[in-house]
Image (tube, rainbow, N blue to C red):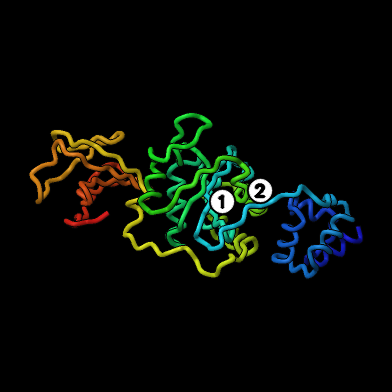
Amino acid sequence: MHCVAILTSFLGLSYFSPKIYEEKYRGFNVKHFHEWACREHGLRYGYTWTKNQLERAGLVRKGKKGGEHRLRRERRPMAGMMLHQDGSTHDWIPGLEYKVDLIVTIDDATSVITSAFFVLQESTESTFRGLKETIERYGLFCSLYTDRGSHYWYTPEAGRPVDKHQLTEVGRALKQLGIQHIAAYSPQARGRSERMFGTLQDRLPKELALHGIKTLEEANQYLKEIYLPCHNQQFSVAPKEEKSAFVPWIGGDINEILCWQTERLVQNDNTVSYKNFKLQIPKDDLRHHYVRTTVQVREYLDGTFSLFFGHRCLVRYNQRGQIKSDPIPLKEAV
């Protein structure tokens, strides 16, 4: 109890409570607790001292020494050479009645998380969002390493290799961007992202609970503004090479690639059927009509649509399938 009293005094608490760790930081591992104690309460002692005091007070268990001998795959030497993207379903937000997915994109060379957010379910949309956030902030990268989920790959036969010729929307977008797509064939191959998720599962729910965060919107705000900057500062490593393989994206509006692209035949009334919409093509100065021609429907992450004839955008629609009033340039490129 004397040890806890000393520890409590150094945390800047005005009262003594032998259960302060359990009451406020229940479930935090010692390292996580020590970071918070230093940052939030001005603790001036080191990790080992803190760990010893908590162990002697019976507030944490003594850790086992040693462990399984493992050989890790070498990291890529430069940032931007390979990124991992994966999702994890977990009780991320304490008090929420359902589990959500955390979608994370991480650099292999540095372990920097380039994008992370909570969604109801992992999908093509979440993949596009992670790619968009990464490219807009860091630049275009060389390769993406993912599992063989159906939104990433077509797999003709369960348990067999993926089809690298019949591409999903994600595969098509990566090919347009010039990013090599690499499929993982074993859990061990995704070890780096799995270890990262272990750290996130240990820390994030406890911090969200500590701040009383109970909604998806609040959790995403905390993740972006508070957690990720601290996580990247603490867990990122220096790459072997100082140069970066990230290059700025200069290929126009990236939303024109990170979207759903589907071909449709124009009907006799110059409309296109897409999902539950009848998308009307307005009069055009360059053609009398587009009847029986093939156009491309693009559906964007914000729920809007457009029609393209070749590289030319014919018309843009809002989320309700209504034509936007803004004029379309005659030579609008992809």
The residue lying furthest to the left in this view is: 288
Q: Earlier in the sequence, mark 1 or mark 2?
A: 2
Mark 1 lies on a secondary structure that is helix
Q: Residues within 10 Å of mark 1 (few under 14, many from 20)?
A: many
Residue in front for this viewpoint, 18 or 88? 88
Indicate which disc residue 198 carries. 2
Q: Position of residue 68 (x, y in %)?
A: 76, 47
The answer to whether the residues at label 1 and label 2 have Cβ atoms under 8 Å apart is: no
Disc 1 versus disc 2: distance between alpha carbons?
Answer: 18 Å
What amino acid is labelled 2 in the image? Gly
Q: Is residue 215 visible?
A: yes
Q: Residues within 10 Å of mark 2 (few under 14, many from 20)?
A: few
Q: Quadrant of the C terminus?
A: bottom left
Above/below status of 137 relative to 300: below
Query: Horizontal placement of 164 versus 23: left or right?
Result: left
Q: Is residue 60 visible?
A: no
Q: How many marks?
A: 2
Q: Position of residue 297 (x, y in %)?
A: 27, 42
Q: Quadrant of the N terminus?
A: bottom right
Indicate which disc residue 219 carries. 1
Above/below status of 184 relative to 17: above
Q: Residue at x 44, y 31 (%)?
A: 156
Residue in front for this viewpoint, 282 or 69? 69
Residue in front for this viewpoint, 86 or 214? 86
Q: Residue at x 21, y 48 (%)?
A: 310
The residue lying furthest to the top in this view is: 157
